[in-house]
Amino acid sequence: MRENDRIDKKTIYRSLLGIVIASINGLLFLYTILSFTSEFSFFLLIPVYILNYLVIRWITKKTKDNIIVFLAVLISVIISTVLPFILLV
């Protein structure tokens, strides 16, 4: 088993921290774009995904081939997408 595929407590804890930090970064990005344009486009999810992936990869030191990292990125993108709409209402 490769080191990148290994799931341990350290990976889980760092992924949880990554979800929080990446969600805040993605939230700030989307909130800024939505406040200037007042329009939402699904194309905005691509840079949010990339931004959140890079943050979580930097924190966990593992790639998206690790299922925990992949799920953390997915969860952070969902949180980053939903929260601007809650804050704008």
Image (cartoon, rainbow, N blue to C red):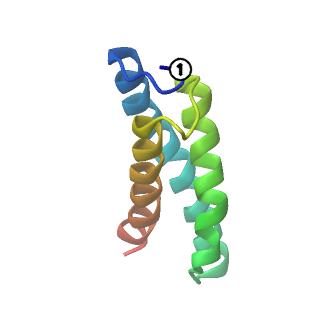
Instruction: Give the class, few, some or many, for how many residues have Cα within 10 Å of label 1's Cα (few <14, many ≥20).
Output: few
Compared with 41, 24 (above or below) is above
The residue closer to the viewer here, 19 or 86, is: 19
Q: Position of residue 24 (x, y in %)?
A: 49, 45
Q: Quadrant of the C terminus?
A: bottom left
Residue depicted at x 39% and y 51%: 75
Compared with 68, 81 (above or below) is below
Query: Type of residue at label 1?
Result: Arg
Q: Position of residue 7 (x, y in %)?
A: 38, 23
Going by the image, does 76 lie left or right of 61? left
Q: Position of residue 81 (x, y in %)?
A: 46, 64
Residue depicted at x 58% and y 34%: 63
Secondary element at tag 1? loop
Asked which quadrant contains residue 47, the reply is bottom right
Residue depicted at x 42% and y 31%: 15
Residue at the bottom extreme of this rendering: 39
The residue closer to the viewer here, 49 or 38, is: 49
* Residue 53 visible in this rendered orientation of the protein: yes
Residue at the front extreme of this rendering: 1
Asked which quadrant contains residue 43, the reply is bottom right
User: Across the whole image, how many numbered discs are drawn on residues?
Assistant: 1
* Residue 20 visible in this rendered orientation of the protein: no
Which residue lies under the disc numbered 1? 2
Compared with 73, 30 (above or below) is below
Q: Position of residue 85 (x, y in %)?
A: 41, 71
